[in-house]
């Protein structure tokens, strides 16, 4: 029987190989991009809505030469100025998004406005001949789904991508590959949370602007925590199962921040999927312990994953159905450590169907990490990846990372969950085929 404390000759050889690879890594702190390459015919884009979320995206956009910002739009002068300056590109500014859409030299738009504005702006952008990146949730009301579908169908050559950035994360793609190959066995249960300890409020200089600046707190504009945070995590379960829920029950309230807000400061929901799988979801604004993650559980193992880190825990008596040739965890070399302390999964292996040397290197990295010697990070953060994918879909025909029906399924789950929370009743999905 293998002893966890033993370092076998095989372990040693792999460790040595990985150590050599680690020594060849770039020096910590070195800039990821030393000089932006010149790209001919970049995608010329405009940004509609230049608030806090847009500023996060602009930070990534400024390092992606395949796109060029030529226009920005916002009705709030402070945000309009901040957004234009952040691009570093001296874009033309607008307060009416339709004027931006009238420009023939704008190839694409990014819609990063309050949720209640997404649907009409998306439809108008498609009808204006633009490629569209729209932040999640894709729409605010259930009845907006079909008009969006119709607009997309009328413009099949235009890219429509939803801002669900986990779909563009290499780490999450590795996790999905593990699931597809049976590393978790039969998936039966999911748990996800996004916990914060703050009031979610932004400072407002003029009280007349309260609802405009803090729109997330008011039901006229916002789907609250379920839309702003839960949408990302519901999508992970939809992705893992290749399906959307069939029912949801929920609860929530304004129990901590009694400051005039209308959206809940805590929500809890249980989603049921077609084969009986359950997702238990929680989001709160009064405690940040364990912050946020998604837990994917099967009879063969568990994945606990979030942006930047994923851990695999093998069941003590594994029932995983993985292909023996895949050899995810090197067979018998996966010991008690993998069941109790977990094994890191790595985002640097974008193509798991590789040769012997690459598989051995991956195992060596796992071993080094388990000893506290080696750490990792994603080669690019997911905002950068999703925007690069958007431009690649436009320029090169690359598959869309989060296409129309992924966005529809995600938005409907948010809407139905909020309805369940508000009414205290179980909400059933309309009968339809599972997503593929």
Image: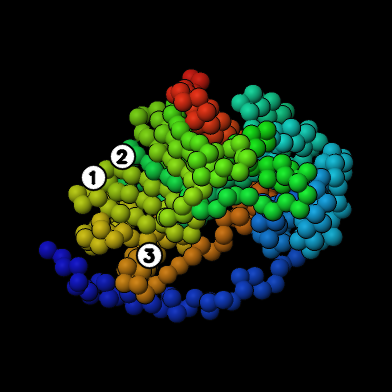
How crowded is the residue under tag 2: few (<14 C-alpha within 10 Å), some, or many (20+)?
A: some
Element on which disc 1 rests: loop
355 or 1, nearer to the observer: 1
Question: Residue at the top extreme?
Answer: 431
Where residue 44 appears, as percent x and y from the top left, is 79, 51
182 or 336, nearer to the observer: 336
Where residue 40 appears, as percent x and y from the top left, is 78, 59
For image coordinates 48% across by 44% down, the residue present is: 283
Drawn side of residue 113 relative to residue 17, left or right: right
Image height check: is 64 above or below 178?
below
Looking at the rendered structure, which numbered label has been put on residue 355? none
Do residues under tags 2 and 1 come within 8 Å of each other at their CB atoms?
yes
Looking at the rendered structure, which numbered label has been put on residue 362? 3
For image coordinates 44% across by 24% down, the residue present is: 426
Q: Which of the two discs, 1 and 3, labels the residue nearer the N terminus?
A: 1
Residue designated by label 1: 319
Residue designated by label 2: 186
Element on which disc 2 rests: loop
Where residue 161 appears, as percent x and y from the top left, is 64, 42
Where residue 94 appears, as percent x and y from the top left, is 86, 47
For image coordinates 77% across by 40% down, the residue present is: 130
Element on which disc 3 rests: helix
In the rendered image, the quadrant that contains the N terminus is: bottom left
């Amino acid at each position: 029987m293998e002893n966890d404390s033993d370092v076998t000759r095989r372990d040693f050889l792999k460790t040595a190989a990985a150590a050599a690879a680690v020594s060849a890594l770039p020096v910590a702190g070195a800039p990821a991009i030393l000089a932006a390459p010149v790209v001919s015919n970049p995608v010329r884009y405009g940004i509609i809505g230049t608030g806090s979320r847009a500023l996060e995206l602009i930070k990534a956009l400024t390092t992606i030469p395949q796109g060029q910002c030529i226009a920005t739009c916002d009705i709030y002068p402070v945000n309009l100025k901040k957004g234009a300056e952040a691009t570093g590109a001296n874009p033309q500014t607008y307060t009416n998004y339709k004027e931006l859409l009238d420009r023939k030299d704008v190839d694409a738009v990014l819609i990063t406005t309050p949720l209640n504005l997404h649907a009409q702006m998306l439809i108008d952008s498609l009808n204006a001949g633009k490629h569209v990146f729209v932040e999640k949730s894709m729409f605010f009301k259930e009845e907006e789904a079909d008009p969006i579908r119709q607009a997309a169908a009328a413009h099949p050559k235009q890219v429509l991508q939803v801002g669900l950035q986990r779909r563009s994360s290499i780490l999450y793609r590795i996790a999905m590959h593990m699931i597809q190959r049976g590393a978790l066995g039969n998936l039966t249960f999911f748990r996800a949370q996004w916990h914060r300890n703050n009031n979610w409020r932004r400072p407002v200089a003029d009280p007349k602007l309260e609802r405009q600046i803090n729109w997330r707190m008011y039901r006229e504009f916002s789907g609250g925590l379920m839309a702003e945070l839960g949408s990302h995590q519901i999508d992970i379960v939809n992705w893992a199962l290749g399906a959307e829920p069939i029912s949801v029950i929920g609860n929530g309230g304004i129990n901590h921040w009694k400051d005039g807000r209308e959206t809940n400061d805590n929500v809890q929901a249980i989603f049921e999927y077609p084969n009986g799988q359950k997702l238990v979801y929680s989001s709160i604004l009064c405690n940040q312990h364990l912050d946020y993650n998604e837990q994917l559980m099967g009879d063969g193992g568990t994945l606990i994953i979030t942006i930047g880190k994923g851990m695999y825990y093998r069941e003590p008596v594994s029932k995983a159905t993985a292909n023996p040739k895949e050899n995810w965890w090197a067979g018998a070399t996966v010991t008690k450590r993998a069941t109790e302390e977990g094994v890191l999964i790595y985002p640097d292996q974008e193509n798991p169907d590789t040769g012997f040397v690459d598989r051995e290197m991956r195992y060596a990295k796992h071993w080094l990490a388990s000893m506290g010697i080696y750490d990792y990070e994603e080669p690019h953060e997911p905002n950068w990846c999703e925007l690069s994918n958007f431009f690649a879909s436009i320029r090169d025909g690359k598959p869309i990372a989060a296409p129309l029906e992924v966005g529809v399924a995600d938005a409907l789950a948010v809407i139905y969950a909020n309805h369940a929370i508000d009414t205290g009743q179980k909400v059933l999905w309309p009968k339809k085929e599972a997503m593929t």
